[in-house]
Image (cartoon, grey):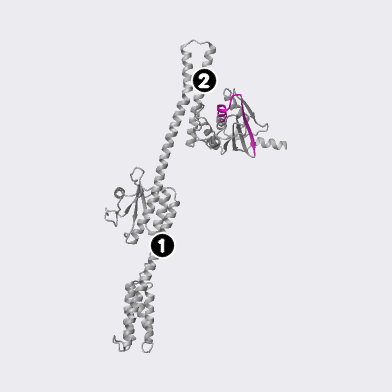
Amino acid sequence: MNKTKKSKINPLVLATLITGGIALLCTPLANTQNYHLVSYILLFVVSILSTFLGTGPVLLASALSAILWNFFFIPPHYTFHIEKTEDILIFSLFFIIALVNGILTTRVRNQEKLVRDRESRTNALFQLTKELSKASGIEAVQKVAIREIRNHFNIESFFILQDGDNILKSSGRLQKEKQLKTEVVNVAEWVFKKGQKAGAFTKHPMGIEYTIYPLPGIRVTTGVIAIKQESGFAGDQESYWDTFLVLISNALEREFLGEMAQRVRFLDESDRLYKTLFNSISHELRIPVATIMGASDSMLNSSKSENMQAALCNEIFTASLRLNRLIENLLNISRLESGHISPRLDWCDLNDLVNKVADDLKDELKPFTLKINVPDDMPLVKIDFGLMEQVLYNLLINSTQYAPPTSDILLSVNYTNGTLVVEVEDNGPGFPENELKSAFNKFYRVDKHRTGGLGLGLSIAKGFVEAHDGTIAVKNRKSRGAKFTIQIPSEKSEINNLQERDYE
């Protein structure tokens, strides 16, 4: 595609052509008594030219208009001699007024242009500040900065940021497809360490085509910015650019420090969770391990009766179940955090599910009265039997740990408006009102000084329910104890639909 270049007319030539053309149009007035009118016309033309031409062309137009008026219009014509004293005075005043008017008008125009430029730059800086304040994250700040630099300076920019250890990365965090040459990266590292600009159009050219500026903040230098331009900044443009960089540097520093603070909080939280998990596991493992060791030692070092050996074996088995439960909870929480939970939905009979869980927990439930409420017309629902078994298991275990012996534990199941509803209620102490929101957090326990698990059961139950696109909630009962409510969307099987049609 061929592009035609528009050649601009030289302002001096333009001023000469316009002044000469107006003088030529006024030639009919040369031989009349109205030749003074030509001076006003030429003075008006000079005023008009001063509104869009510079000082040089305006001075040329002023001098040329005075010469043309003298030579062609003031008698005697075609000579620079002036006979009348009043014409000499008028000519002098015309020349002075033309010069002063042209110069003053040009200055006013320049001042107006300067004010407009300043207003435009102030508005651009305000817009940049506004956009940067709304940007969240280093990548978002970079996007805003690159866009605004392109809009106001018509140049492309490229950020090279440090990785948090005062070491620059070889490619930007936003423009990952951009690959810089080794010499550019070396200059960028020099700029980052020295805090001075380098590259093209600086006193440290270093043989590269980019101009690289540091991005210093109040507390930390986040990196450098590289730009490629045809000519360097000069005058107000340079101070305008420096102000742009200050605003961008401050925004990057804000997000950079925010990331560092978040990283520190994450490390602190990880360390806290590690200590909590380590202490909990140590505490929870000590009891069943001690039980197994004691019972095994008794069986090995003494001849006990068959009843005593059976009792010791039962203790070992119970302690082994407790160890297995701890290990399963740890594995389940690991699966939840890794996102590897994918429920295998199938038609299930809730009576089978409830009876299976109750049978698995028959020893733990002996001191309590478990009341199960499943409607006779309870339909088959589509759930993952294994995951829901673990959910009910954890909820009932939680009730046995906090409810007083001989109290009732209620397990209710219902199906309403396409939703499976499961409720577990106990007569325990319930939850402190200000801690209800934390009930499903990992390692949360109401009484941290008593044994009975790692505080993972409810968190696992919540994860398994949400894997079914369901919800689980807890609230304190009005009388005493806690009430857990599970709601899982599920369709009914065709068998139930056929039965309903038959009844109709």
Q: Residue at x 41, y 45 (%)?
A: 258
Bounds of the magenta span?
395-416
Q: Can you tell which quarter of the image residue 91 is in?
A: bottom left
Q: Nearer the viewer, residue 87 or 212?
A: 87
Asked if residue 409 lies in the magenta stretch, the reply is yes
- Outermost right residue: 504
The reply to whether residue 387 is visible in this rendering is yes
- The location of residue 32, given as percent across then percent down, is 38, 89
Q: Nearer the viewer, mark 2 or mark 1?
A: 1
Q: Nearer the viewer, residue 331 or 381?
A: 331
Task: Tell which circle, 2 or 1, labels the residue nearer the N-terminal end.
Answer: 1
Q: Tell me the distance, in whole angstroms, between the alpha carbons under discs 2 and 1.
A: 81 Å
- The location of residue 410, given as percent across then percent down, is 62, 29
Q: Residue at x 48, y 36 (%)?
A: 337
Amino acid at dot 2: Phe
Is 7 rendered above or below residue 301?
below
Q: Can you tell which quarter of the image residue 493 is in?
A: top right
Q: Can you tell which quarter of the image residue 36 is in?
A: bottom left
| Badge number at residue 317 | 2
- The location of residue 390, given as percent across then percent down, is 55, 30
For label 1, the residue is 120
Name the element at disc 2: helix
Could you classify mark 2 by the number of other residues whose Cα lies within 10 Å: few (under 14), some (14-19), or many (20 or more)? some
Left or right: residue 204 compared with residue 394: left
Asked if residue 499 lies in the magenta stretch, the reply is no
Is 38 rendered above or below residue 150?
below
- The location of residue 485, given as percent across then percent down, is 59, 35
Left or right: residue 341 compared with residue 162: right
Q: Residue at x 36, y 43 (%)?
A: 164
